[in-house]
Amino acid sequence: MSPSAEAEAPEVVEVAAQERPSVVERAKQRLESLGAMTQMTGQVLSRAVRPPFDGAALIFQVETLGVRSLPIALLTATFAGLVISLQFGYFLARFGVQYTVGRVVVLTLFRELAPVLTALTVGARLGSGMAAELGAMTVTEQVDAIRALGADPLRKLVVPRVLACLLVMPVLTVFADVVGLVAGALVVNAQYAISLDLFFQGALDAVFMMDFVSGVFKGAVFGFIIGLVGCFKGLTVEGGTEGVGRATTQTVAITSVAVCLADFFITKVTLYL
Amino acid sequence: MAFSHRKKEAPTFEFHRPTPGEQLIHFEHLQKAFGAKRVYDDLELDVRAGETLVVLGGSGTGKSVLLKCLIGLQRPDAGRILFQGHDVTGFSEEQFIPVRRNVAMVFQGAALFDSLSVGENVAYPLREHFPDMPLDEVRQRVAEKLALVNLPGTERLMPSDLSGGMKKRVGLARAIATNPEVILWDEPTTGLDPVTTQSINSMINSMKKKLGCTSIVVTHDLVSAFAVGDRMAMLANRRIVQVGTRDEFRRSKVPEVRAFLDARRVELEPGGMS
């Protein structure tokens, strides 16, 4: 190290230590962020139910966010159905009840795997995409321009995206239910020689409407969370393009944790319904 | 926060056509900080109707923030902003709408909406402020404003098809679509070549002649400032250190103004740029 570098080094460390926020400050920032997001949730809900409604923007977002997410949702559901059917077929055979595999697979898929895996895979795509798009609009002052031109960014940008996620996720969950079940039936038929009739008959006997509805309801809640987090992180980007990258990463992390938390509480409630 | 939405009961703002020279905007004891960084301490500034006021200052001194405070995109921490005598400081988003109809902003990077064509961008404020305006009239107004900024027939182009100078001009066409009384120019010539800079300067002057509107231009480009400004204000050390005509600025002995002018002069002189 050169003498000049040696002389500067302590100052650099000192500055870095000063700039790094303390644990208390970081906790305060997190709480403020949570408060702002709660406030935005209320504002989005109030705008979503009050006219004017922008149907064209909603349809565009449903097409952009939903239809284009279908392949990844179906692929995930197919492999989830294949793997859990193989696993349950193998374990249930130990107890001599492999013919019940259809019952177990349908409940696992409908109540848990289809909504959660769809939310985690599709949600990461949707949330990060929204955060990046709105983040880019924020740093290029397009969001400010919307306000300066007399429009409301929440109504123009956030409401259509959140509503689209809310509508799209339950539909994708239903597709995932069907595709996962069919994939499971085919693989146990090929691997364990369980007929398709027996598989589906067992599945239909075991499943109640509540099992199906609880999964679809989870999809709607997860969609709402994904839409809100993606939009919030996009609109609150700071620090230019670097901030946009940070916001997309944070969106994936936050939506994943939020989906798991929400899943636990919804499961807890729906088990008693 | 970008989407903050304050509710406050206050009389609605009604704009009346000002007489040239009357005080149109008054920034009174303005204070603003971003975290620990203070931007303004007791900032005072007047803008008169019909003039082009240039706000000069170095990078990061809060020139753009001043414009954003005027139309409610940023909120001051203390002090007042009077627009035609109305205190607009605590206005809600809804209350700011008539202010924003009469005060248009041309953003530094143009801030055109990427997903909309040039024509849709220019029509955007018309659809927001005048939702009942017939489609033919909207089309006519868009064509008229694009012709005014020397970009006739470009309605179908997308922002990605445009050069930097063209984007600024489309941004101007969008800003003047509602026939505003005040145009706010945020660094209009930054990042442009000298020829395009000259054409933007001509455009600022021609807007004043053709539309008779008031302009506030924030810039650190001295050539542009002296080409368009009727009066100039220097923002330094978190306040306005001098306001005056171009000649008063040239003769200024205020240290911050002198330092700014002399530094730029060195750049413009032969051999001044390394």
Image (cartoon, coloured by chain):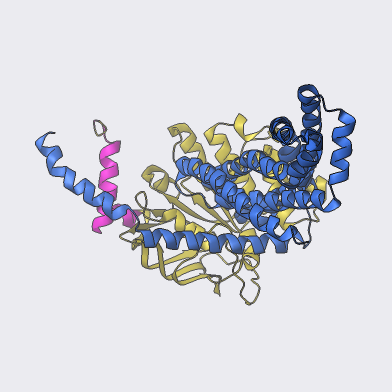
- Compared with B193, A216 (above or below) is below
Task: Determine the residue positioned at 81% across, 56% down.
Answer: B132
* Range drawn in magenta: B247-271
Task: Determine the residue positioned at 52% across, 62% down.
Answer: B70
Q: Is residue A129 left or right of residue A13?
A: right
Which image quadrant: the N terminus of chain A?
Answer: top left
Q: Is residue B184 left or right of residue A176?
A: left
Give the percent coordinates (x, y) of residue A250.
52, 46
Q: Main secondary structure of the magenta part?
A: helix
Give the percent coordinates (x, y) of residue B40.
37, 64
Q: Which chain is blue?
A: A
Q: Is residue B265 magenta?
A: yes
Task: Determine the residue positioned at 47% across, 44% down.
Answer: A243
Res. A153 visible in picture: no
Quarter assignment of residue A242: top left
In depth, the one of B133 and B271 nearer the eye is B133
Q: Is residue B144 left or right of residue B100?
A: right
Which hue belongs to chain B?
A: yellow
Give the percent coordinates (x, y) of residue A150.
65, 57
Quarter assignment of residue B39: bottom left
Which residue appears farthest toward the top when viewing the image?
A190
In depth, the one of A216 and B160 nearer the eye is A216
